[in-house]
Amino acid sequence: MLFVELFIIGIGVGYIAGFFGIGGGTVVVPIMVAFGYDIKTAIGISVMQMIFSATFGSYLNYKAGFLKLNRGVVLGFGGLVGASFSGIIVSYAPAILLESLLLATFILSLLKLYFMPNSDGSNANNSLFLLFLVGLFVGALAISIGIGGGVFIAPILVGFLRYELKKAVSMGVFFVMFAAFSGFISLSLSGHISYLEGAFLGLGSLIGAYFGTKKTQAMDKKALKKWFLLFYIAMITLILKDMIFG
C-alpha cells in the first residue's frame, strides 16, 4: 500500500512541480518526514523524483516555446556543478540546519516574489555569466535541502534579471533537471537514496507534470503570481509545524 500511496502522491507532486516550475521537493520532503523517514533520506527520495518530473516538464515547455535552450543550458550547467557538492553538505550538516535553511528559503522567496515588479521580459539581463553563477549557488544550496531550486530561480530571474514570469518558470524546471541529476549521483554515492520509493514517486509525477505544465502555460501572469504567493505561505506553515511540533 505504501507504494500505491507514493504513486498517487507523485501525481500531485508532479502537478505542483509542473505548475510552479519547481522540483517538487518542497512538498516531498515534508511528506516523507511525516511518513517516518529521516530528513536526509527524505531529501534523497525527493531528488530522485525531481529527475522524472523536471525532464518531462522541460520537454513540454520547449515544445510550447517557453524554454530557450542556450540560456537554460548555462543556468543548468551551473546548477549541475553546484549540486555536485550536495552529498558532502548533507552528510556533514545537522538536520536542524537543513530544516532551518529550507524555512529561510521559503520566507525570502515569498518576500522577493511579493515585492518584485511584473516584467514582460523586454529589458531582461541575459548575461550568461550571471546565469551560470545563479545556477552554481542555487544548485549547491537547493539540492542540499531537498528542493530542486525552482523556488529560487523564478524569483531571482524575475526580480533581479527582469525575466517574464512564465519563461522564468520554464527555466526553473530546466534548472531542476540538471541539478537533480547531479544531486542524485552525489547523494547516491553518500548512501542517501531510497530507490524504490523515489521511482514510484517519479512515475506518478510524470502524469501530474503534464497537467501542471499545461495549466501554467495557459494561465494569466497575475493569477500565476498569486498562486506562487499562496504556495510559499502554505509551505512555510508546513515546515514551521514540523519544526515546532516534530
Image (cartoon, helix red, strand yellow):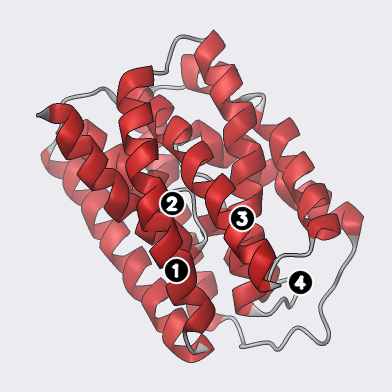
Q: Secondary structure at mark 4?
A: loop
Label 4 to label 2, Cα distance in Å? 22 Å
First in residue order: circle 3 vs circle 2? 3
Q: Secondary structure at mark 3?
A: helix
| Residue denoted by label 3 | 58
Residue 65 coordinates in the image, percent (x, y)? 71, 72
| Residue denoted by label 1 | 110
Question: Is the residue 139 above or below the residue 127 in the image?
Answer: above
| Crowdedness near tag 2: few (<14), some (14–19) or many (≥20) residues, C-alpha within 10 Å | few
User: Which quadrant of the figure has residue 59?
Assistant: bottom right
Q: Secondary structure at mark 2?
A: helix
Q: For the residues carrying marks 4 and 3, which lies nearer the camera in this image? A: 3
| Crowdedness near tag 3: few (<14), some (14–19) or many (≥20) residues, C-alpha within 10 Å | many
| Mark sitting on residue 161 | 4
> In which quadrant of the rendered image does the N terminus lie?
top left
Which residue type carries mark 1?
Leu
